[in-house]
Image (cartoon, coloured by chain):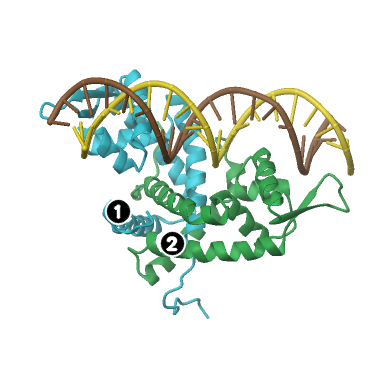
Chain colours: A cyan, B green, C brown, D yellow
Amino acid sequence: MTSLPVVNQPPHRCGALVDHLARRLRLRSESVLAPLGLRPRHLIALTVLRDQGGSAQQDLAKILEMDSTNVVSLLNELETENLIERRRSPTDRRRHLVELTDVGAKLLARAEFALAAVEDEVFSGLSGEQRETLYTLLQQATNKTGVEACRETPPC
Amino acid sequence: MTSLPVVNQPPHRCGALVDHLARRLRLRSESVLAPLGLRPRHLIALTVLRDQGGSAQQDLAKILEMDSTNVVSLLNELETENLIERRRSPTDRRRHLVELTDVGAKLLARAEFALAAVEDEVFSGLSGEQRETLYTLLQQATNKTGVEACRETPPC
DNA sequence: TATTGTTATACTCTATAACTATA
DNA sequence: TATAGTTATAGAGTATAACAATA
């Protein structure tokens, strides 16, 4: 008798497991990133800036789901290390367009290489195929309950 | 140089997605738990105590992957609200055996009901079957890279 | 001496409010 | 007035060191 999910709606709760895995990833990522002078938040920001370069700071705050005030200090740290640059928007001088520097791009590449090893270890319990399935499910979950959906419901 | 293994599985990186989902879960859980006088850490501890009642504090620290000093203050808060009890171990008087009280069990049940709604919303992008698959994968990942595996590797 | 629990402390993360400069 | 960015600050989460009681 294999456990077949005949159950309709009340599935197992994934929240605790997600939190647990995120915890492990964060703890190990910190150790790996520390020698590079980076912390987890730095890396997330750098990654977003590479993928969606030239974002305004408030857009970054939404993508990162961080408070905009904390984005300021985060970018300050990255700018001090010459990893990012802030440029005034020509069309709207209130905005700062943030972009990755060459130094930042190179450091990001090094960090991602180190982080790949962390992920390989944390997800070592899964096969490559399973990891791919997991990735698909996670992405589907994050996209569906994205910013739009988050803004729709009152208790957000 | 050393010949690399034939790695045909550099899968997508799940880390950022896990972190992102955990973030959403935490933010919404906080709103839902606040009216009950609880915070996410409280709930995790109560859940563990119900499932593995009578644990010593240091065991709790390992399960929760928290520093043991923080477990102390966490339990202090729960004890103040009469949600848990600390009893001296008869066999080893250094140990405190922590157990859920009736009050704690009832509050935990209410909190879990509220949290189920949060999860339903956060994972609304997935079907029931997909959520079940996700649960299985997450559980497999967390179990395989458990405490033992974590202790094995040096850069832990 | 080693272990369990505890206290004190510092550092990071996060959110709120008030301010500036632009629009 | 409304928005983008900033500053100051307070609360929560986390980790390290030193200590007391017990083994």
Q: Is residue A61 left or right of residue A23?
A: left
Q: Is residue B45 above or below residue B129?
A: above
- The spot of residue D22 in percent (x, y) is 89, 42
Q: At 71% across and 51% down in the image, what residue appears?
A: B79
Residue B36 sits above or below residue C2 on the image: below
Q: Is residue B110 above or below residue A120?
A: below
Q: Which mark is residue B74?
A: none
Residue holding disc 2: B119
Which sits in the foreground, A129 or A72? A72
Residue B134 seen in render? no
**Which chain does the numbered disc 1 sit on?**
A
Q: Quick one: quadrant of the C terminus of chain B? A: top right
**Alpha-carbon neighbours of circle 1 within 10 Å: few (<14), some, or many (≥20)?**
few
Q: Position of residue B13 (x, y in %)?
A: 36, 47
Residue A23 in the image, given as x and y percentages of width and height: 51, 45
Q: Amino acid at mark 1?
A: Arg
Q: Name which residue lies at 54% across and 63% down.
A: B112
Same-chain status of marks 1 and 2: no
Element marked by disc 2: helix
Q: Quadrant of residue A54?
A: top left
Name the chain under label 2: B
Residue A118 placement, left or right of A72: right
Residue shown at 58% from the left, 44% from the top: B150
Residue shown at the point (83%, 44%) measured from the top left: B94
Q: Which x, y percent locates residue B155?
A: 55, 35
From the image, tell me which residue sits under label 1.
A151
User: Secondary structure under badge 1?
Assistant: helix
- Tell me, yes or no, whether the two marked residues, 1 and 2, touch with CB atoms within 8 Å: no
Quadrant holding the N terminus of chain B: top left
Whether residue C12 is situated above or below residue A135 in the rendered picture: above
User: Disc 1 and disc 2: Cα gap in Å?
Assistant: 16 Å
